[in-house]
Image (tube, helix red, strand yellow):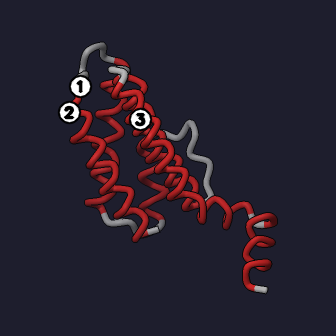
Amino acid sequence: ILLRRHRGRLMSDRGYARYRGADRKASAVLKKADKAARGNDYADAYASLNSALTHYIGDRLNAEVLGMTAEEIDSLLDDRAVPEQVRRELRELMEHFSLVRFALGAGADSGAYREYRGRVRKLLDRLGRKL
């Protein structure tokens, strides 16, 4: 009976379905980023890291974050009482990802990618505990 209720809720409540699938979806996007980095496509890898963060937040909050600026996402998280330190880390990462995606050659090495990928994973874990 519980499983049937859970499945029913997943089918009828989009916000619940997004919330429940956020971790799995973020992991899949991180794998996509890793694949791009292995192919030396760092622009795509960093775009995927950015996407993992923004879509995770959108899924956890059932909000459309596509097209939102970092400041708008920050405001959304502030409304949810996410600590300033977590929000600052998010802003820093998003700014770096924009720079790397649009500045040719910036951040184009595997060591820097691994560092930022690790920071994203830690931030996703921290956001998961706060949202």
Labelled pair 1, 2 in contact (Cβ < 8 Å): yes
Q: Where in the figure is residue 7, as x and y percent of width and height?
A: 76, 71
- The residue closer to the viewer here, 77 or 104, is 104
Q: What residue type is labelled 2?
A: Ala
Within 10 Å of disc 1 (Cα), the crowding (few <14, some 14-19, many 20+) is some
- The residue closer to the viewer here, 75 or 121, is 121
Residue 107 tag number: 1
Q: Is residue 67 left or right of residue 1?
A: left
Labelled pair 3, 2 in contact (Cβ < 8 Å): no
Residue extending farthest top:
104
Q: Where in the figure is residue 103, as x and y percent of width and height?
A: 30, 17
Q: Mark 3 points at which residue?
A: 33
Residue visible at 79% across and 64% down?
11
Within 10 Å of disc 3 (Cα), the crowding (few <14, some 14-19, many 20+) is many
Q: Distance between the residues labelled 1 and 3?
A: 14 Å
Residue visible at 80% across and 72% down?
8
Q: How far apart are marks 1 and 2 (CA)?
A: 6 Å
Mark 1 residue element: loop
- The residue closer to the viewer here, 49 or 33, is 33
Q: Which amino acid does label 1 sit on?
A: Gly
Q: Mark 2 points at which residue?
A: 112
